[in-house]
Image (spheres, grey):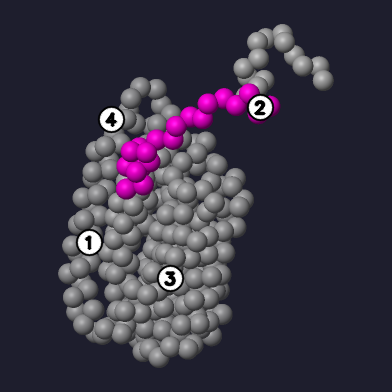
Amino acid sequence: MLGIGLKVGKGELLSVVQDKSWLVRMFVVNFILIPAVGIVAVRFLPMKPENALALIFLACAPGGMSALQFLSKKKEAEALAYGAGTTVLLTLLAILISPPLISLAIPKGLTVPYANVILVVVLLMLLPLLLGVFLRAAPGAVAAKLAGPVSLIATLAFLGFMVKLLAMTKKVKGEMGTTGLLSIVVFVLISLLIGWLLGGPRKFTRPVLATASSMRNGALAIAIAVRSFDDVAVLTPLIAFLAIMIPVNMLYMIVTNVAGKSRGSKSSACPETEKPADPRHPRDAQGSRPAGNVDKT
C-alpha cells in the first residue's frame, strides 16, 4: 500500500471513488454474482460440510489484501489507483456486508471481531496508502527514491508469506482431497472470469477487477469462522483456498503480460500508414484550403 501511494496521486485515487459505473460493477461482481455462484455450488454439488461452509464464507467475503501484490505491478498510475482503491473499498464494504450476507446462506449467528478487523484495515491499508500519497506530493524526489526499495521489501515479504503458507498447507491439501482442491481452483477461475467480463469497457480495468474479485478475503473469513464455530474443521479449506488462489492469479498475471507484449510487438511491427488527404472529404478539403478562401455555400 505504501508503494502504491508513492506512485499515484490524490486525484487518481479520488477518480476511483467518483467513478459510479465502476463502483456499481465492483459491487455487483463481488456482493451479488460471486456469492450467488458459491451458494448455488453448495446447494447442488456434493461436498463435505466444512468445504461447503468455507466456500460460502469466501464467496461472500471479498477484499483479499494479497491481491495488492499483483495489482501493484501495474505500470500505469491509473491502473495502480484502481487496484488500490478497489481493494480498500472491497475490504471496508466486506466488514459491513459480508456477515449479513453469510447469515442469509447459513442460518446461524455469527461473531464478528469488528474492532480488530477495522484496526487491521486502518493500520495495514489506509495509513500506508495515505502516507505514500503525502510523500509523493512533498517537494523533492523523496517518493521516487523510496518507491523502488519499498516495492522490493513488499515483494520479499510476500515471498516469505508464501513460504510460510506453503509449509502450513502440505497437510491441509492432503485432508482436502482432489475433489475439494479442484472445486477451489474452479471457483477461483469463475471469479476471475466474472471480474474480467464485467471489468470493462476500459482495457486496464478488466485485469484489475478480475484479480481483485478472485482474491477473496480469507483473513476475514477465518476471523469470523474461528469465533463462530466450535468445530475448526472449516479452517482446513479456508487455508487451502489461500494457498491456491495465489498461484492461479500468478499464472493469470503471467499469461496476460505475455499476451499484452505479444499484441504490442505485432502492432509495432505493422504500424498503420497514414492515409493521404482526400479533397472530396469535407474535413480533408477544408484542411487543404488556404486561409481566407471560405466556401460560403
Q: Where is residue 41 in the image (x, y as percent from the top left)?
A: 46, 82
Distance from the alpha carbon under mark 3 to that under mark 2:
52 Å
Amino acid type, mark 2: Arg
What SS does tag 2 mark?
loop
Label 1 Cα neighbours within 10 Å, binned few <14 / some 14-19 / many ≥20:
some
Amino acid type, mark 1: Met
Label 4 Cα neighbours within 10 Å, binned few <14 / some 14-19 / many ≥20:
few
Amino acid type, mark 4: Lys
- Name the mark on residue 145: 4
The residue identified by callout 1 is 162
Given this view, does label 3 or label 2 mark the residue nearer the observer? 2
Distance from the alpha carbon under mark 4 to that under mark 1:
27 Å
Upstream in the sequence, badge 3 or badge 2? Answer: 3
Q: Magenta region: which residues?
A: 262-282
Upstream in the sequence, badge 3 or badge 1? Answer: 1
The residue identified by callout 3 is 190
